[in-house]
Image (tube, rainbow, N blue to C red):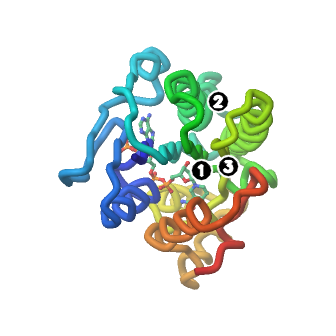
Amino acid sequence: MVIITGTSKGIGKAIAENYLSLGEKVVGIGRNHTLSHPNYSPVVCDLGDPNLVEQISFPDFNEEPIIFIHNAGILGKVDYFEKLDSNEIGQVMQVNLFAGAVILQKLLKQIPKPTSFKCVFISSGAGRNPIASWASYCASKAAVDLFCQTIQLEEQQLGRNDFHCISVAPGVVDTDMQVGIRTSSETSFSEVARFKEYKDSNQLYSPELVAKKLFKLVHETSLQQVLYSLRDINL
Ligand SMILES: NC(=O)c1ccc[n+]([C@@H]2O[C@H](COP(=O)([O-])OP(=O)(O)OC[C@H]3O[C@@H](n4cnc5c(N)ncnc54)[C@H](OP(=O)(O)O)[C@@H]3O)[C@@H](O)[C@H]2O)c1
């Protein structure tokens, strides 16, 4: 059973399709649902609304392993932080970190030990190196990294030995998020030319490649650490 947030498009949709093609059951959580498959169960939820996230519930789990992938994410408005509305950072943190954290907490409370349970947060290189005009996004992904490291430590101390929590940077991927980045103005985003060049020189990963690399990492690698980059995973 695989629970994935943000399956309507991009990386999340490719991850869901990859698992469905392998016969897995997938629960997708998000505002929009574009997948139709007998093994796909949609849960409609705007992850930007904490009250709606709090209402998410799961039936008892009677199969394992359970995989939770918090993939849904937003970049927020691309501009210098001093020019943004004050609520901008809150919404980015809500979708990128808090929504996934609340869902994970529900799962940790509900899934009995011992059960094979793997939790993946989709992070970003931008959480490990600063990018001007992405302050909220960088902060949210850095927080995701340390959140996952802390949860892994806690669950080890609590004796949940079949649990792994990892935070995975996917690389630069050909999705709508990159389309949004490339349409930024040079005035608001000094590095826009670099991201246009990634596209023009075919340097973007496809979402399907990212889904396959993530599968290899999660299922065919002994997870000895928490922070990963899919650039290091070779198929
Ligand atoms: N693309 C890259 O180069 C790149 C690089 C590093 C990390 N990432 C990370 O990879 C993950 C997926 O990004 P992507 O590139 O696939 O972006 P994307 O194509 O924009 O897809 C984002 C997904 O998140 C969902 N989502 C956004 N806000 C939501 C909300 N309030 N409630 C529910 N779902 C919401 C979207 O659903 P809706 O249909 O509701 O909009 C969509 O399914 C993100 O965490 C992103 O930060 C991407």
Q: Distance between the Cα atoms at labels 1 and 2?
A: 18 Å
Q: Which residue is pictured at 55% across the width and 33% down the height? A: 100
Q: Mark 1 points at which residue?
A: 122
Q: Earlier in the sequence, mark 3 or mark 1?
A: 1
Q: In which quarter of the image is residue 231?
A: bottom right
Q: Where 235 sits versus 124, above or below?
A: below
Mark 1 residue's CB less than 8 Å from ligand 1:
yes
Q: Nearer the viewer, residue 74 or 145?
A: 145
- Label count reads 3
The numbered mark at residue 172 is none
Q: Where 115 sits versus 223, above or below?
A: above
Labels 3, 2: front one = 3
Labels 1, 2: front one = 1
The residue carrying pointer 3 sits among few (fewer than 14), some (14 to 19) or many (20 or more) residues within 10 Å by Cα, namely many
Q: What element carries label 1?
A: strand
Q: Which of marks 3 and 2 is nearer the N terminus?
A: 2
Q: What element carries label 3?
A: strand
Labels 3, 1: front one = 3
Q: Quadrant of residue 115?
A: top right
The residue carrying pointer 1 sits among few (fewer than 14), some (14 to 19) or many (20 or more) residues within 10 Å by Cα, namely many
The numbered mark at residue 166 is 3
Q: Mark 2 points at which residue?
A: 89
Q: Which of marks 1 and 2 is nearer the N terminus?
A: 2
Can see residue 81?
no
Q: Which residue is pictured at 61% across the width and 26% down the height? A: 85
Q: Which residue is pictured at 48% across the width and 61% down the height? A: 179
Q: Which of 128 and 153 is in front in this view?
A: 153
Q: Which amino acid does label 1 sit on?
A: Ile
- The reply to whether callout 3 and callout 2 are in contact (CB within 8 Å) is no
Q: What residue type is labelled 3?
A: Ile
Q: Distance between the Cα atoms at labels 3 and 1?
A: 9 Å
